[in-house]
Amino acid sequence: MKHILSIAASALLLSSCSIYSSYKQTEIAPLTVDPYQDTTYRDTIRVAPQWNQVFTDVNLQTLLTKALTSNIDLQIASLSIEQSEALLRTARLAYLPSFMLAPEGGVMSLDKSKASYSYNLPVNAQWEIDLFGKLRNSKEQTRSALLQTREYKKLLQTQVIAALANNYYTLVMLDKQLQITQECVANQKQNLDVIIAMKEAGMQTEAAVNQASANLYNVQASEKDIQKQIRIIENAISLLINETPERITRTDFSQIKGIPVQLNDEVAVVSLSNRPDVRQAEYALRESFYGVNAARSAFYPSLTLGGTAGWTNSAGGFISNPGQLLLSAIGSLTQPLFNRGINQANLKISKARYEQSKLQFHQTLLSAGVEVNDALVLCQNSQSKLIIRQKQVEANQRALDNSLELMKHSSNTYLDVLYAEITLLQSRLVSVSDWFEGVQGKITLYKALGGGSTPE
């Protein structure tokens, strides 16, 4: 027994000199900002706030709460996390000795003599000493896989929030465009009545009446297209919140307060380490790092300690009653001899996977920087473009009013009025699209900065 304890003590000393090495977190260098952006977008870092601080619309918050609790993809991700946590607990238990109770009993009678009963009540124990970090590397690999699943759920959560917010504000935009189109339909009907009356008075031709009718039918067809798009978006939102298709309650366009994301002072572009996809990529790199360590440890021997303790009445060739204490201990050192080629191949594969993980991590960082810059450009341009578009709408409205007056009091044809009406309708619809583009840019920026998730 003393020899076994000596072997265990020596193993613990050797384990401190093992080939195990800890992973060091990758330094994320500052990313280059788009040189075409204003300097107000380059200063310091600001982490995206939580979703309920960004999306303050009451109806949208109700939908987001439903999605975060009922979305199918998020539920699947939660189950994956539970599986990874169970695997990590299993890896931790590998450090502890395993115990097994193996009771035995028998009866023997020779030539009709009195039967003798024998029994063994042993408890077998086995403990693998982690000499060269094999168990520890395996545990760290499992821990890295768990952290990946957690970050994947955060990534899914960010994507669900962004998708739902995009669809919600798309509905608000379509509602406004539908309202504009319906107002245009009403105006077109009035204009058609005026053209018919002017034709009867000899002031317009049959061609003008046909043109007015065709223009009215075209706008009515556009109205149907918008209504179809509204139904499709509502169905998409219902899928995200895991409910059957229904009408989605939303706020009117005139009451929308916008998304409180400040863009006029400082925006986070220096560090993207808070993004779930970046952290997931680094945990994948961490996992492959320990995979290389595990492949190296396969070249070294493993030490296993075993022992048995219990009671027995079978001592060699005779049976004694009462039973006696049974103790035994053994240590084994296993050195791989004929699988060196397999170990070398596994090490080469592990190193290649590690290099792949480094490249994927670098690619994820580059993609994150591009997304942030794209979102900033979208936000910046939409603000100035919306002001210009409003001026265009006002100019088109004045042009339409002037064309109507000229048609009523002069020989001006309906073609000028038709062109002015189409131009005004298009500019009003595009103005609402420009507003949505700005909202979409802020949603994209929120997503690009990590979606408000905080690192553990």
Image (cartoon, rainbow, N blue to C red):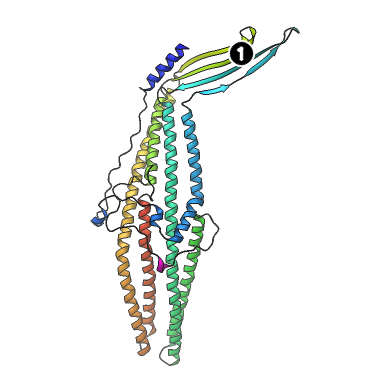
Helix, strand or loop at label 1? It is strand
Which residues make up the magenta segment?
246-258
Q: Residue furthest front?
A: 322
Q: Main secondary structure of the magenta part?
A: loop
Q: Amino acid at mark 1?
A: Thr
Which is more toward the observer, 107 or 310?
310
**Whole-percent x and y of residue 402?**
33, 83
**Whole-percent x and y of residue 71?**
50, 51
Q: Residue furthest bottom?
A: 201
Against 234, residue 197 (above or below) is: below
How many marks are shown on the rendered structure? 1
Residue 142 placement, left or right of 41: right
Q: Residues within 10 Å of mark 1 (few under 14, many from 20)?
A: many
Query: Where's the C terminus, which quadrant?
Result: top left
**Whole-percent x and y of residue 235?**
51, 60
Verify whether residue 166 appears in magenta.
no
Q: Is residue 135 visible?
A: yes
Q: Is residue 353 visible?
A: no
**Whole-percent x and y of residue 419?**
37, 78
Q: Residue shown at 44%/30% (left/top)?
A: 138
Q: Quadrant of residue 263?
A: bottom left
Which is more toward the observer, 362 or 330?
330
Q: Residue shown at 51%/46% (left/top)?
A: 76
Which is more toward the observer, 19 or 353?
19
Verify whether residue 254 appears in magenta.
yes
Q: Which residue is mark 1?
A: 312
Against 406, residue 90 (above or below) is: above
Against 180, residue 336 (above or below) is: above
Residue 307 placement, left or right of 254: right
